[in-house]
Image (cartoon, helix red, strand yellow):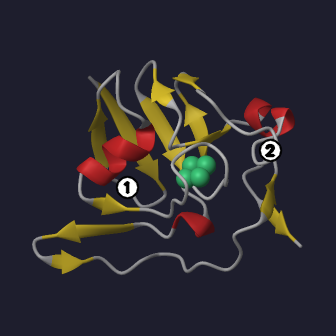
Amino acid sequence: MYTITLRPVGGTVACGPEETVLAAILRAGASVMFGCRGGGCGTCKMRLTSGQIAHGRCSAAVLLEEEKKCGWFLSCQARALSDLTIELSAANKYLRQQGGAVTTPAYRVVHFHKLALCDGSTRSS
Ligand code: FES
């Protein structure tokens, strides 16, 4: 079992070696943006800042090789190979239940189609 630390919102979730990062986050009671869960839409894209993952099946149209080199991955396909630290982007729209109350999201969705840059920023058209 590995630990995933979510930045900048804080908090950790446990992730088994056979489950995807997205499945672990959802199982932990958090809510993030996702779509097809098949590696084809890119909605679940997140950025790894430390740790090792196996990318799994990803469409090259939604996750470029250049993005992979910068740490971006599709959470619906990726599996942890170590403890991870993940940078959530504005499009992740993170929410988590805490004691029956939903925390106020630190972000709101602005764009779904974006280019992810190595410094963690994004550009949308
Ligand atoms: S939800 Fe569509 S690529 Fe992950």
At horizontal 51% and vertical 49% (from top left) the residue drawn is 37
Q: Residue at x 10, y 71 (%)?
A: 99
Residue 95 x/y as whole percent: 36, 70
Give SS at disc 1. Answer: loop
Q: Quick one: label 2 or label 1, which is nearer the N terminus?
A: 1
What residue is rendered at 36% in x and 81% in y? Answer: 104
Q: Which residue is mark 2?
A: 118
Q: Quadrant of residue 118?
A: top right
Q: Which residue is mark 1?
A: 10
Numbered label tally: 2
**x and y percent of residue 110 in the render?**
67, 80
Of the pair 51 and 124, the residue shown nearer to us: 124
Q: Type of residue at label 1?
A: Gly
Distance between the alpha carbons at the discs numbered 2 and 1: 21 Å
Q: Which mark is residue 46?
A: none
> The C terminus is located in which quarter?
bottom right
> Dot 2 lies on which element?
loop
**Is residue 5 shown to the viewer in this render?**
yes
Crowding near pointer 1: few (<14 within 10 Å), some, many (20+)? few
The one of 36 and 54 positioned closer to us in this rendering = 36
Taking the image as shown, residue 49 lies to the left or right of residue 85, namely right
In the picture shown, does residue 56 fall above or below 72? above
Q: Say which residue appears at 50% left-offset and 43% top-offset.
A: 76
- Neighbourhood count class around disc 2 (C-alpha, 10 Å): few under 14, some 14–19, many 20 upward: some
| Residue type at tag 2 | Cys
Q: Position of residue 79 (x, y in %)?
A: 46, 28
The image shows residue 17 at horizontal and vertical percentages of 35, 21
Determine whether 33 is above or below 3 in the image.
below
| Residue 45, visible in the rendered structure | no
